[in-house]
Amino acid sequence: MKRAFPLFSIVTVVLLAYALYQALVVAPTERTMGDVQRIFYYHVPSAWTAFLLFMGNLVASVIYLIRRNPKADALAVVCAEVGVVFCTVVLVTGPIWARPVWGIWWTWDVRLTTTLVLWLIYVSYLVLRRFSDSAQTPVLAAVLAIFGALDVPLVYFSIWFFRTQHPQPVIGGGGSLDPRMWHVLLINWLAFSCFAFLVCWSRYRLELLQREVEQAHAMESLAGAGVSEKASLPLSRSTR
Amino acid sequence: MNSFWALLSATLAKDIRLEWRSKDALNSMLFFSLLVVVIFSFSFDPNAEESREIAGGLVWVAFLFAAVVALNQTWARELRNQVLDAYRVSPAPANSLFLAKALGNFLLVTVLEAVMAPLFIVFYNLRALGPAWELIPVGVLGTWALEVNGTFFAAVSIRTRSREIMLPLLLFPISIPAVQAMVEATRIILAGEGAARFWIVLLLTYDLVFTTACLGLFERVLNAE
């Protein structure tokens, strides 16, 4: 396990470098948008990775609520944190591309709005975890994750209807993608997923270590207070 | 099942009696939304045409903010004297407590809306061009959408530090589709453009989904340890 981490890091770095070369040099230049279209190779893979991570957060939260396994809770935190980072990348690269191509930074289109609301929900998830340092935090956070998952389809439908009522000319739907572009996109996605996995992996180890430290502190103060060492605390007592 | 309704009505009656005698929440909500009405009308200074377009948004934002004022008090009241802990160790069903609290808040905000609606009409010179009766289902469903999730997240935020700030941070992102539906439905009815049916159905779906979710998960929140 210990050797796997550096090995995987090297693979990820090589893959990211190769994907960068593919996106900036190998991929053909788009006919109408020009070079600015290349941001697509960062925007879309980040979005897919973020959605995967949010899905992971939901699954981990449900598992935590059923099994009360503290490791599932740690996984949920990690997925939410890294997911918010990738979602932020999506929300930042989107307007950078939209400004020269659509002529506007932002539009309240279905996908944009749903992504923004998803981001807001997960930021509130992280705020909840930050503001709550009791043993109940994992349950409360898992419940919030489920509420967020229920909310997203409703947001999607409401905006979809709203925008079909008020049509916007800027939605880049339809059209087909050059097979070479597909190739570069998929390589970039692979590289981004590996990178996300790597970050999650190290963050997960950090989270578990942090919990161990907190538990050790708790045990120490218990022992200091004259309570027998055998009065062990369950792992779920730890915060965050 | 009998004890479920008995508990529900007992808790609801207790909350209503408390509110009736103190009128704390109602007074602060009324004054707060009155301030919102006045400040908004200074900031936008709309004519009759514009008010029809923006009134839906103003009304619901005012009610949303006012509801948060009341929601923050719902559970804080039960923390004193460890009432919630007593409830937890008793065999009483958690959902009857939740439903009583949600219904109590719903009634409170409904009273607020009944008092504030005429004021809005006067200050903004409103006259519905569409079928005005449709505002009733929009109001009922919209208020329930805010209150059911608001009561739930108030129970969540009561467990955190700086709980009064936490409630809107948790509630507002989840409420976005409901608020959009309420605002759009109200705007369509006031301006008389087309049918508000889609938004009413969306509100109904939202209510059904989240009432189920709240009832399914409230016990875990109450007993979270």
Image: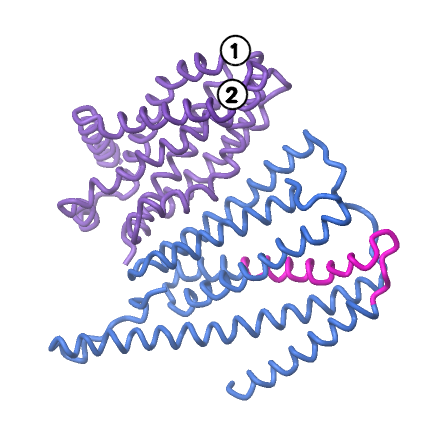
Counting from the top left corner in percent of width and height, residue B182 is at 50, 28
Residue B82 position within the rendered picture, expressed as x and y whole percent measured from the top left: 16, 48
Disc 1 marks a residue whose amino acid type is Arg
**In the image, residue B154 lies in the stretch drawn in magenta:** no
Q: Residue at x 68, y 29 (%)?
A: A165
* Chain ID for purple: B
The residue furthest left is A226
* Amino acid type of the residue that numbered disc 2 sits on in the rendered structure: Asp
Colour scheme employed for the rendering of this structure: by chain
Q: Is residue A28 magenta?
A: yes
Check the rendered structure and report the hue given to chain A: blue
Q: Chain of mark 2?
A: B
- Quadrant assignment for the C terminus of chain B: bottom left
Give the residue furthest to the right: A31
Q: Earlier in the sequence, mark 1 or mark 2?
A: 2
Residue furthest out toward the bottom: A3
Badge 2, how many Cα within 10 Å: few under 14, some, many 20+? few
Above or below residue B121? Residue A225 is below
Q: Main secondary structure of the magenta part?
A: helix
Q: Is residue B176 left or right of residue A140?
A: right
At x 48% / y 26%, what residue is drawn? B43
User: Could you tell me which residue is drawn at 33 percent across and 57 percent down?
Assistant: A132
Q: Which residue is mark 1?
A: B127
Q: Is residue A112 left or right of residue B214?
A: right
- Span of residues in magenta: A27-55
Q: Residue A56: x, y in percent?
A: 53, 62
What is the x, y in percent for residue B51?
Answer: 54, 19
* Distance between mark 1 and mark 2 Cα atoms: 17 Å
Residue drawn 51% across the image and 22% down it: B55
Question: Quadrant location of residue B66?
Answer: top left
The residue that disc 2 covers is: B45
